[in-house]
Image (spheres, rainbow, N blue to C red):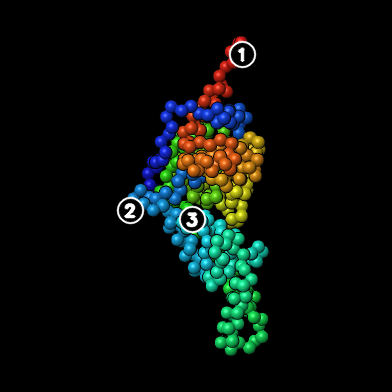
Amino acid sequence: MNAPLTADGPVAPRGSAPADSLVALCSDVLLRDWCVLFDFDGPLADLFAAPRWSVSGRRRTVRATRDLRRVLRRHGVSAPPLDDPHDPHELFRRTLDGLAPAGSGTFPAATDTFPAGSRSGERPAEVREAGAREHRVREAAAGRTDGARPGARPDGVRLGERPAGPLRDALHARLDTQERRAARTARPTPGAAETVRLLHGLGLRLAVTSNNAEAAVRAYLRRARLLGCFLERGTPGAGATSAAGGPAAVIVGRDGDHRRMKPEPYCLERAMERHGAVPAASLLIGDATTDVKAARAAGVAVCGYGPTEDKARALRDAGADVVVTHMSQLTAALAEARARVTRPVSAGG
């Protein structure tokens, strides 16, 4: 069952005119027929918000991270150190980035440990040797005399390692599932629907470029009745279908290669390609420094969404072109820009 869509969040600023820089950017967007790319979790919705019926009030990130840890335990793999113990994306990425040295195709088992504060996740030589010693002891106790090299198994995988493929697939599947479930109760970002509808009404090309699963994004947009705003230009109405059977919306989410997630520009580039857009006439609306980095790598302008003072400051420091603290500011700037670009020039002008 889907929860009702109501937006809770910061109150829109009262009596404040949009900044000139924001209006100028929006004027460019309208005059040059820009493509507007939205990050999903943040600018459009709070994906992992606690369900309204939750007694504990805990965000769904707690459950999602716990489930990912269960996957690791089932595969005999230890979790890497995290900055935020309840961030499923951090756990997901650091596990896949850090636990397997490049090109090895294997992950260390849970008996292996990581140095305190380790982020690279490379298996130190002493850890590998400790695993080999443990294996030799077990072989001797079992009376092995087949001459196999120390630290080896008949299948050629060293002790303390597991094939990477099954774990990678299991992590992707579990995170996808958790995000699809969260999409049922995700809370709309205040003012976001109005911004999307205005941009769509102005005839601009819209897309979602997200580190979340495409299925979760699509489910939320359908629930919010916004999916039709993100169709490829030329698609004959919201009833059109893609090869996958759903509306041909331009949504580029996380795929099977986690290395393509932002701050890599992959999803932005794919969305622009589908819309026939160029970076110099594209804008990303995002709420994280990874969005800014991805936009810079793709050559795209950035409007940061920072609903808190800390987030807004981080986005400015990261180099966002403009920053809004409420989506209504962007809507107001677009309306002002529309008035400017359609205002007739006076005879003496």
- Label pair 1/2, CB-CB below 8 angstroms: no
Q: Residue at x 59, y 55 (%)?
A: 258
Which label belongs to residue 55? 2
Q: Quadrant of residue 99?
A: bottom right
- Give the farthest residue toward the top: 348
Q: Earlier in the sequence, mark 1 or mark 2?
A: 2
Q: Is residue 40 above or below residue 128?
A: above
Measuring from the top left, give residue 9's x and y in whole percent: 41, 40
> Which residue sits at x=52%, y=67%?
78
What residue does disc 1 label? Answer: 349
Relative placement, left or right, of 218 versus 25 is left
Q: Nearer the viewer, residue 38 or 323?
A: 323
Q: Amino acid at mark 3?
A: Asp
At which x and y percent is residue 176? 50, 55
Picture coordinates of residue 18, whole percent (x, y): 50, 28
Residue at 46% across / 48% down in the picture? Answer: 47
